Image (cartoon, rainbow, N blue to C red):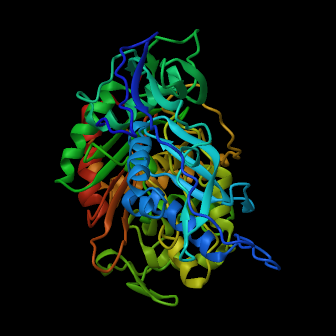
Amino acid sequence: MPDTPHLTSPRRRGPRNGVRAVAAVGVVLALAAGGSYATGLGPFAPGDDGPDPAATQQARAFLADWAAGRLPSAADRTTRPETAREVLRSFTAGLDIGKPRLTTSGEAREAEDGTLGIPFTARMPITGLGTWTYESRLPLREQDDGSWKVDWRLSLVHPRLSDTEKFRLEREETTPPEVTDRKGVSLSGGGHPSLAPLLGRLAGGADGGPRGAVELIDRATGETVRTEASFGEKPDPATAGRPVRTTLDATWQSAAERALGEAGGKNASLVALRIDDGEVLALANSPAGGFNRAASGTYAPGSTWKIVTSTALLLKGAVAPDDVVDCPKYLTVGKEFHNVETSEHPGATFRKDFTESCNTAFISLRGELDDGELGEVARTHFGVGQEWHVGIPTYDGSVPVPKDETEKAASMIGQGRVQANPLIMASVTATAVSGEFHQPSVTAGNEDGTRTEPLPGEVVTRVRELMRATVTDGTARVLADLPGEIGAKTGTAEVSDDQDNNGWLVAHRGNVAVAVVVEEGVTGGGSAGPIVHSLLSAVPEDPS
């Protein structure tokens, strides 16, 4: 920043003790007494219950302008606009502060110098480190025309900012550890683009993540007076420098990323995980950069949710595979529901309803379940809606109690307010075909606070039979030519009137469960099917 009579440029310093001095903030100015009050007048007039509302309004407007980055406007609300503008700019930019949150707090009090002090809380987000929170006070002084202005002084920015001391941000240089797959093979964003946004987080968990501090320093000597705020945890000496091993498998991850090429440029996500322990073998997104749809997305799972619905019905003894459950083209429950391509299967068995993904048949069975029963089964047996600790940020699903009969009908087929993503649906598939929920994981040693109950063996057997029949005789025939005893369920999920449906497919083979969603893929078999086929064609029938 340029030298001015009131501003001291930050001193450039080389690395010291493994720490890089990033920025310095300093301002030197003479404090002025500001305006004066007429005799007998002040912020609290005789008999008043509080400060002049105009003073409080000016304080809040100043804080709002500062927080929003409107620094010239904030400065114009002070008694020294030019100096205030430069100080606020250098403080925010010099300490790598993002968008501050500044809120008034506590009671306004009159000071000995005649100003009205209004306390406020500052929450300053330091880019890449964390939030620096402190308390300060805005001095307001009434002007000759009766208006109020912030009586400018350094200490209002921070109580310890002065003409002899300033702040400096220091970031500790850290080298993130290597991230490997389950077999020790190095994983990189170049070789596995979908992992690029996640590798830093995975590595940061091992070395405590980014570290740094805001230090108060002497302007004349540059020596540290005190540390105002520290960020980041020190690494565990026992693990520092060691590679971070994940549950991922480089072979499966590469195959997953290639398979998403079958999405034809549409947004798509894929998760493959081990059935016996929930360990994630592959997690891929297309496009690869940015938001992790596979684990954090929120989608209606469509007819793949019929795995959970069927489980709930079988648990209750409400239906058996050979029971006749008619499948008409349409069914009205508050609104008209229909099947994909308005198909119908008169006199169909429940097995046929499942393999052909008949919406109207499933909706006709809604009365067999209590309003909150589907959500309770999802939570109790599949862990959906509980808090998962996977090793990366996740959305863990939601199955709220339906508000009315129409929403209950929609929830039977994975619509309404039922929300999931490929990670959840891969886990649902694994649970359904094994009978036991295992919290998914990308790293080892995660806390598991979930509480679930196993499914009865006879229910598991029937669900497996239904999913196998969907591959041999139903909507997942796209997988029928692959080796191994594959079971699957397709799904088509409505999004809105002006968007094509999302396409889903979940499958299991050996010890692996897979889930894929293709945004606006129209049908599950047509859009997600080729992706799953490509993946399972390129990997062993069972992971080692």
Q: Indicate the position of residue 254 as horizontal and vertical percent values.
A: 26, 31
Looking at the image, residue 490 lies above or below residue 178? below
Image-quadrant location for residue 504: bottom left
Q: Residue at x 37, y 29 (%)?
A: 10
Residue at the extreme front of the image, as rendered: 39
In the drawing, does residue 371 fall left or right of residue 468? Answer: right
Camera sees residue 173: no
In the drawing, does residue 338 fall left or right of residue 451? Answer: left
Q: Indicate the position of residue 46 as horizontal and vertical percent values.
A: 80, 77
Q: Indicate the position of residue 123 as horizontal and vertical percent values.
A: 57, 48
Q: Nearer the viewer, residue 189 or 265?
A: 189
Q: Tell me the quadrant of the picture where the C terminus can be found.
A: top left
In the drawing, does residue 266 fall left or right of residue 319? Answer: left
Q: Tell me the quadrant of the picture where the N terminus can be found.
A: top left
Q: Nearer the viewer, residue 49 or 284?
A: 49
Q: Which residue is drawn at 73% across and 54% down?
A: 112
Looking at the image, residue 201 lies above or below residue 322? above
Q: Which of 119 and 362 is in front in this view?
A: 119
Q: How many labels does the image show?
A: 0
Q: Which of 347 and 417 is in front in this view?
A: 417
Camera sees residue 190: yes
Residue at the extreme left of the image, as rendered: 264
Q: Residue at x 58, y 44 (%)?
A: 155
Q: Indicate the position of residue 353 as horizontal and vertical percent values.
A: 44, 69
